[in-house]
Amino acid sequence: MASVTFDKATRLYPGGDKPAVDALDLQIEDGEFLVLVGPSGCGKSTSLRMLAGLEDVNGGAIRIGDRDVTHLPPKDRDIAMVFQNYALYPHMTVADNMGFALKIAGEDKATIRRKVEDAAKMLDLTQYLDRKPKALSGGQRQRVAMGRAIVRKPQVFLMDEPLSNLDAKLRVSTRTQIAALQRDLGITTVYVTHDQVEAMTMGDRVAVLKDGLLQQVDTPRNMYDRPANLFVAGFIGSPAMNLVEVPIADGGVKFGETVVPVSREAITAAADAGDRTVTVGVRPEHFDIGTEGGLTITVNVVEELGADGYVYGRTDKADGGGQDIVVRVGGRNVPEKGSSLHVVPRAGEMHVFSTSTGARLSD
Ligand SMILES: Nc1ncnc2c1ncn2[C@@H]1O[C@H](COP(=O)(O)OP(=O)(O)OP(=O)(O)O)[C@@H](O)[C@H]1O
Ligand SMILES: [Mg+2]
């Protein structure tokens, strides 16, 4: 087992004008489950493929443990990769699919059989070992692909959207299985997804990428509680954090009719950058709802989920007008569609970002 280090690793595709992955600095601990997440085209697969040796590295270095693997061919890196399309061999049985890499490596038949049976037990595939892939469900095929990686006992697992071919329900149960399996095996894992919920539920830590640039690496909890910039704030969390541009006032910011206190450091930093506004972030569960003050919103849609509900509203003209706001309310206390609400961020639950740079200003 081993740690993984991206040391200012850069990939510029031939003919490209800017790097697909730009000076990526990332240290993944031995045994850690790290999730790379971000929107389509941000460089997730490229980062993973650089680590796998399937993509040239044009700058910086990649290390597995203390080995510099930057220019090693894939077969010498001791990694196993699970892709989105599992690419099972259709004419081979499940057992042969799982044991194929071992056969190529020249292991003897009895050893291969034992390793395949061990992995099958872990993955609940024992009864399917003699079947062909076409006689399996999508979830079972996905587990065979996992099995193929597990039997090799690599130093590092790489997974690129391995669940995206599964339906929503199966995706949820399979992600729990993969996370549990990884914990049992203790093999360092880099997992790519564009789904922030998957990232937050599976990762020991999560790395958010945008346009080839690393935005933040943190535990899911810290990522949610303390997003480093406006992009992460808007990307992590569902429904998304409300982001509202507000004027700076004496001692705080003017949130509708209410001045909400903000740390002096945050205000000073904004003023130093020449800004007259800041952008505040408030999660849907962090509003106090009242009959006066704050922002006035008109309720457009109410989503009742039983235990709680989400109110989708829009600010009135007096408050700038036309800004969408989402507020979580208790399930027994749901406002009527068309009614007016006053919302104020709960004390200490507001995030402050620079409107001009997007950087986090509050601590
Ligand atoms: N072989 C290639 N040649 C040139 N450009 C490429 C190549 N592969 C990817 N790119 C570009 O590099 C950028 C990053 O691509 P990448 O596949 O890493 O994104 P991703 O984050 O995995 O996206 P998705 O979520 O859609 O899979 C994109 O702008 C893409 O168009
Ligand atoms: Mg991809």
Image (cartoon, rainbow, N blue to C red):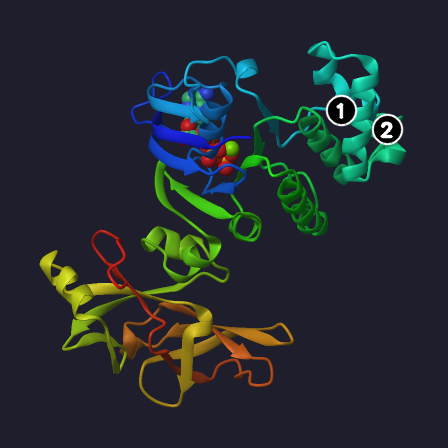
* Ligand 2 neighbours mark 1 (CB distance < 8 Å): no
* Ligand 2 neighbours mark 2 (CB distance < 8 Å): no
Query: What residue is shown with label 1?
Result: 98
The amino acid type, in three-letter code, at marker 1 is Met
Residue 269, quarter of the rendered image: bottom left
Q: Report the front residue among 64 and 278.
A: 64
The amino acid type, in three-letter code, at marker 2 is Leu
Establish if 149 lies above or below 351: above
Residue 63 drawn at (x, y percent): 42, 25
Residue 187 drawn at (x, y percent): 59, 35
Mark 1 residue element:
helix
Q: Earlier in the sequence, mark 1 or mark 2?
A: 1
* Residue at screen point 60% across, 27% down: 81
Q: Report the front residue among 77 and 278.
A: 77
* Residue at screen point 68% across, 30% down: 150
* Residue at screen point 81% across, 24% down: 114
Query: What residue is shown with label 2?
Result: 129
Q: Is residue 45 left or right of residue 141?
A: left
Q: Residues within 10 Å of mark 2 (few under 14, many from 20)?
A: some
Determine whether label 1 and label 2 are within 8 Å by CB.
yes
